[in-house]
Image (cartoon, grey):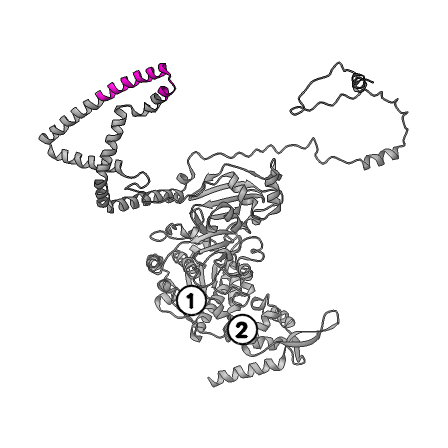
Amino acid sequence: MSENTVLGQLEEPERPDAEVFDITTKRPTEPAPLPVEAPPPAPPVVEDEGDDEDAEAAKPRPVDSPDLPAPGITTYKRLPIVPSWLRSKPGFVATTQRAASNAFYATAFHGIRTPWYALQLGLLAPRGVARRVQQTNRWVWDAESAPLRAYEVFHENTAEYLKLTRQRDRRVRLRVLVTTVALVFGAAFALTLYVMAPGWLAVLAVGAVLVAGFWGAPQDHPVIGPAVLKTELQKLTGPIVLRALDNIGNAKLSAAIKKGGDMNGMRFTSEITRDGPGYRADLDLPWGVTPEDIMEARKPLASGLRRKVGCVWPSPDATEHEGRLVLWVGDKPMNETTKPAWPLLKSGTVDLFKPVVFGNDQRMGDVAVTLMFASVVVGSIPRMGKTFLMRLFLLIAALDPRAALYAFDFKGTGDFGALEPVCHRYRAGEEDEDIEYVLNSLRELKGELRRRAKVIKSLPAARCPENKVTPELANDKSLGLHPIVAGFDECQVPFEHEKYGAEIEAICTDLTKRGPALGIVALFGTQRPDAKSLPTGISANAVLRFCLKVMGQPANDMVLGTSMYKAGYRATMFSRSDRGICWMAGEGDDPRIVASAFVDAVAAAQVVARARVLREEYGNITGHAIGQQPESGEAAFDLLADILKVVPADEDKVWNEKVAARLASLRPEVYGGWKAETVAKNLRPHGVTAQDVWGSTTAGKGTTRRGIARTDLLTAITERDGNRSGD
């Protein structure tokens, strides 16, 4: 069998619609399927009505109803007409200050070095003249075209060579003429100046020498260099943000970024813009990712952005949904940025019922706080600005002429000393007489609290509809409902006092719970935020919380609130150089970063002097400010005696939790909220220690729990009373 015959058998029959194509660039299309004859219709099946209902119930129902009306609301975001740094005072001030500062520095830098510059330029002038003569000579004789003419000669291109030669001759004639005219007129001008104005000729000569010096300076080492070296910071762009987010270790973020396309809902909602001294990027995170997830990873995020961690501040947007992230990236860390001056430093008064500016955020925007109707907790490690912040709040209160100030400094260094001229009660120290002074002041506040409650209760509903102090009631001197602000710095000292600690803690807890509605604001500052130094009754009821640098999660959550550390609000991220920078919670929907205004002791004394004048005009100089001391009185309660009342003689031992419940029934205003641990802690200074006590539960089962013995209680009372009689 021949080869052609075999090939003929292997070939398929020709198709009329065959097509020739390049297999590397085009794929053949699948042939259309042959028509298939439809089978005959099946006979109808008759079903009963019950089967129809079951089939309809089993059929899946669509979730999206076509008749569901649209909300008809479209959100528009307008781009700013004026740049953000021109619309905000802090942004404008920061921009102009930076430009003016650089200009002033450059002027001073170069001004001092002017003689050295002149000497260098004079020495370089001969080289500059020689360089200029050489360049002029090359220009006159058209030296730059010589390689072209040599090329044409080498390749024997006569026509091209003649064309270039004629062009060169025309250029040389024109340039020689221009150079000759310039030399003649220049010499004549110099001679004229020499005859008529020799002084100007000297100025021009000096200028010519300096210019020649510039010409002679090396290209890689100019005589006059920059005075301000710019640090190269990358402009924040979308790819840089995505790169940083991809490297923080969040699986959902990384998967969305690598996916591309819709990115699981991740997108930039607006253009990246300048916002104060930094950039702002708004973006929707992937489904299920929240801004708190980003806030937990500030350090890897800052690494991806190639910024210091103090420049990177991710935060949620309170006006949007829970997946909206606002990423603000500053040019410099917050602790290196110049803080704006406190607006009330030199003028102005305060209404404690309204917000008052006390600091700034990362963007250098003003941050305000409303002290009325809130108790305040401030916590940090030592030397981070806690006392300065406490004093700033008391200065704010001092500028409201209606307010009465109670300032207690248990560190004993006199940090609140500038406030003495306007304080109703003031004390600095931790000795027993100091603690007793504070206790008497607190008993005074306790009585004032009860009096105010009665006054509020007696007022008609039309005048006091919310049963709390209002600005109108505070202005009425006859009611005595003016604001009262009490500050306790290093509050752990009085709370841990062996003799008066329990009573002080009870009164302060009551002030924290009931005081805000009655116009009494309590401020507590501590450098050891734990359950012992900051009782639960105070930390759990404080509204405004300020946490500067702390060392661990327990202290962080004790100040800011439970689970704040887990949510990403971590004051442990602050460094030792972040003095005065804190997380603020309670003024708004979310915690935010705030740098408090810096007011030193000298400036504080000036503010107090102005506040004293305001108070004299208002008629509110009382107490310590005019030399009056608090009245000493007996304790509002006796803990040992009260426990003895609730533990009958037939009970030798009793659980602490039962003691706490009975005390709460005896004096709810004092012991409300006490637990077994609270009883044990307050009895320890009296020598009554907890021990294992056998007892029965409500279900009738016997078990061992911590409790006290009645004999230990009697012994403690006997020793205390004996010591008192001996005194």
Label placed on residue 637: 2
Distance of mark 1 from mark 2, alpha carbons? 25 Å
Which amino acid, by three-letter code, is at mark 2?
A: Phe
Q: Is residue 174 left or right of residue 554?
A: left
Label placed on residue 429: none
**Mark 1 = which residue?**
409
Q: Give the mark toward the camera: 1 or 2.
A: 1
Q: Is residue 723 left or right of residue 181?
A: right
Q: Is residue 262 above or below residue 27?
A: below
Q: Position of residue 82 (x, y in %)?
A: 42, 35
Q: Is residue 376 left or right of residue 5?
A: left
Between 263 and 139, the one lying in front of the other is 139
Between 345 and 521, the one lying in front of the other is 345
Q: Where is residue 17 in the image (x, y as percent from the top left)?
A: 74, 15
Q: Can residue 354 be seen in this view?
A: no
Q: State whether the magenta stretch is mostly helix, strand or loop.
A: helix
Between 415 and 548, the one lying in front of the other is 548
| Quadrant (top left, top right, bottom left, bottom right) of the N terminus | top right
Q: Where is residue 388 in the image (x, y as percent from the top left)?
A: 41, 60
Which amino acid, by three-letter code, is at mark 1?
A: Asp
Q: Residue at 58% across / 33% down in the picture?
A: 73
Q: Which segment did they paint magenta?
A: 151-176
Q: Is residue 470 above or below residue 282?
A: below
Q: Where is residue 495 in the image (x, y as percent from the top left)?
A: 50, 69
Instruction: State yes or no: residue 233 in magenta.
Output: no
Could you tell me which secondary element the residue under label 1 belongs to?
A: strand
